[in-house]
Amino acid sequence: MEAKAVSALGIAGACSVSAEETEKWMEEAMNMAKEALENVEVPVGCLMVYNNEVVGKGRNEVNQTKNATRHAEMVAIDQVLDWCRRSGKSPSEVFEHTVLYVTVEPCIMCAAALRLMKIPLVVYGCQNERFGGCGSVLNIASAELPNTGRPFQCIPGYRAEEAVEMLKTFYKQENPNAPRSKVRKKECQKS
Ligand SMILES: [Zn+2]
């Protein structure tokens, strides 16, 4: 899919990304996803860009940290908060003008976190069929949730095939930290 210049207007003012920016940042996010895969983590990589500067980035590190919440987006959010502290900027000002570039559709948890941080725009690669929070399972991104931050706009499908290939490679291999539940076994027998 070709990247288009898209503006998220009407949500937190103006926030737009060019095709060149998308290409540049998504390339970096893809490299981080590859690194995650090499480290036996769910291959998701992401960057948060504010004023053309990377203010936070992350890859999934759930297995490494043995903490199920350490998705790439959560790692990146913490880095942006650190960046705000160091540069004396208010997080609300920064997040409201930050674009997230991520290789996979954010999950339900991360989509809710992005709403709470009031990130206006998310560019992502493939769909997250298991846990997606931008339409695949639930649409937290644009749901009417008056007490959960703000909705955000998505630009999906950038290098989606590559991103989904990485996910497939990951789920084919055995995850040494996965719990062996009955539900999981049933799923395996079906496929
Ligand atoms: Zn997530």
Image (cartoon, rainbow, N blue to C red):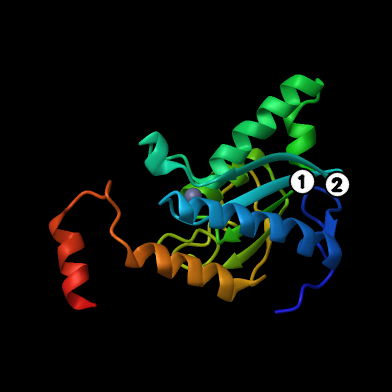
Seen at 50% across and 58% down, the residue is 133
Viewed as shown, does residue 154 lie left or right of 15? Answer: left
Seen at 81% across and 23% down, the residue is 87
The quarter of the picture where residue 189 lies is bottom left
**Which residue is identified by label 1?**
49
Q: Name the quadrant of the C terminus.
A: bottom left
Mark 2 burial class by Cα count in 10 Å: few <14, some 14-19, many 20+: few
Q: Are marks 1 and 2 in contact (CB under 8 Å)?
A: yes
Viewed as shown, does residue 92 lie left or right of 137? Answer: right
The quarter of the picture where residue 125 lies is bottom right
**Which residue is identified by label 2?**
52
Type of amino acid under label 1: Val
Camera-side residue of 118 and 130: 130
Secondary structure of the residue carrying tag 1 is strand
Seen at 33% across and 67% down, the residue is 172
Type of amino acid under label 2: Asn
Viewed as shown, does residue 87 lie left or right of 71? Answer: right
